[in-house]
Image: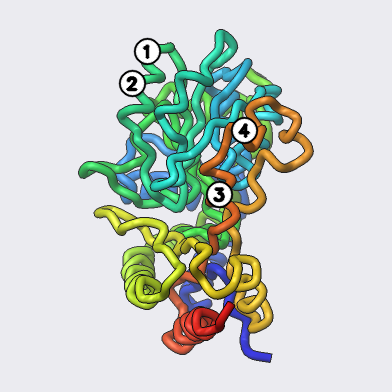
Amino acid sequence: MKSLIPVASPLLPPLEDFIPYLQEIWRTKRLTNGGPFHEQLEKELADYLGVKYLSLFANGTLALVTALQALRISGEVITTPYSFVATAHSLLWNGVKPVFVDIDPHTYNLDPDRLEEAITPATTAIMPVHCYGIPCNVDRIQQIADRYGLKVIYDAAHAFGVRHKGQSLLTHGDMSILSFHATKVFNTFEGGAIVCPDAKTKQRIDYLKNFGFADEVTVVAPGINGKMSEINAAFGLLQLKHIDAALHRRKRVDGIYREAVSAVPGLELAWTVTEGHNYSYFPILVGPGFAVSRDALYERFREQNILVRRYFYPLITEFPMYRGLESARKTNLPFADDISHRILCLPIFDSLTDDDIDRVIQIITTAASETF
């Protein structure tokens, strides 16, 4: 069987480069609870991303859950059906009702034109997602939030390093949440972070991610154990040294795919590359003019041990804990439903070889040459 090509693969620097970090952890005997590598990574990430305050977490889902707690969100929150389930799950974990709104068919992000009709007296916040690292319409969303006195929490799991109008995309809204899962552009194997605007908010977040402890004998909130370990933080520090080179290589893969796919009838490029993008995903749309269906093309890849993904299919609203909601009805979400049945994300990562890229393109061109 041909070698496996995952949809994403972590940047893995040489093992010998990681050994000094492990030796230092063993020397200090600081394994967790905000050790020196944890503190260093928070500072270096904030500097790299161009943000003032960043708090590390064991994973992005715990960061989402804690962000909602830190802002004391309750009632209803407007969000997208077109995302990974963690976005909506974080609301349920906080006893908050998700209200789903359709997406813009060009950006796959929450459609600002649909937001106001979803606002009720119970609405307290908006939780958009920068899907595939494509910036939401942050100005429109903030205008609506300000008009109705709502908080804005961005699920920025895909948006590491993305810039918008000359500044970090993560500076928008009340908080932005990052994921450092192994499949992400920047990863700590498992990890995440909350970006917030001021020191007081960061302090509350730091209490909440450590069970609510303010000191050894004082608990100020019903917090959770969301802390990142020293080993994960050390790996993040090593990753950060190589991230610019990784982004450059991902850009090259994107360019090769883009040229090949644009010449295939029935396939659409999901978007035009914008300045400041991070090439975190390469989604294509399989239309009725293509020789085989999206799912048939998906199976062709799987047969060749290439792990393409249908991100995001099914929609969040099709899972049992959400589909009974009024806002989850398919008639309310025509664009999200349509895109979810046509989307296919091709493998993209920094260590993808030219031979691997050729294999991916060959499967597409072979399928395209078939007759109906």
| Residue 147 tag number | 1
Q: Nearer the viewer, mark 4 or mark 2?
A: 2
Mark 1 surroundings within 10 Å by alpha-carbon count, few (fewer than 14), some (14 through 19), many (20 or more) = few
Mark 2 surroundings within 10 Å by alpha-carbon count, few (fewer than 14), some (14 through 19), many (20 or more) = few
Q: Between residue 140 and residue 102, name the one nearer to us.
A: 102
| Circle 4: element type | helix
Q: Is residue 39 visible?
A: no
Which residue is found at the position 62% from the left and 39% from the top?
A: 62
Query: The residue under label 4 is which amino acid type?
Result: Val
Query: The residue under label 1 is which amino acid type?
Result: Arg
Circles 4 and 1: CB atoms closer than 8 Å: no
The correct choice, above or below, for 352 with respect to 121 in the image is below
The correct choice, above or below, for 366 with respect to 127 in the image is below
Circles 1 and 3: CB atoms closer than 8 Å: no
| Circle 3: element type | helix
Mark 3 surroundings within 10 Å by alpha-carbon count, few (fewer than 14), some (14 through 19), many (20 or more) = few
Q: Report, in whole angstroms, how far the alpha carbon at label 4 lies from the one at label 2.
A: 25 Å
Quadrant where the image shows the N terminus: bottom right
Quadrant where the image shows the C terminus: bottom right
Q: Report, in whole angstroms, how far the alpha carbon at label 4 lies from the one at label 1.
A: 25 Å
Q: Report, in whole angstroms, how far the alpha carbon at label 3 lies from the one at label 4.
A: 29 Å
Q: Between residue 71 and residue 317, name the one nearer to us.
A: 317
The residue singled out by tag 2 in the image is: 143
The residue singled out by tag 4 in the image is: 65
Circles 1 and 2: CB atoms closer than 8 Å: yes
Of the image marks 4 and 1, the number of the one nearer the N terminus: 4
Question: Picture coordinates of residue 153 (x, y %)?
Answer: 48, 30
Which residue is found at the position 48% from the left and 61% from the top?
A: 285
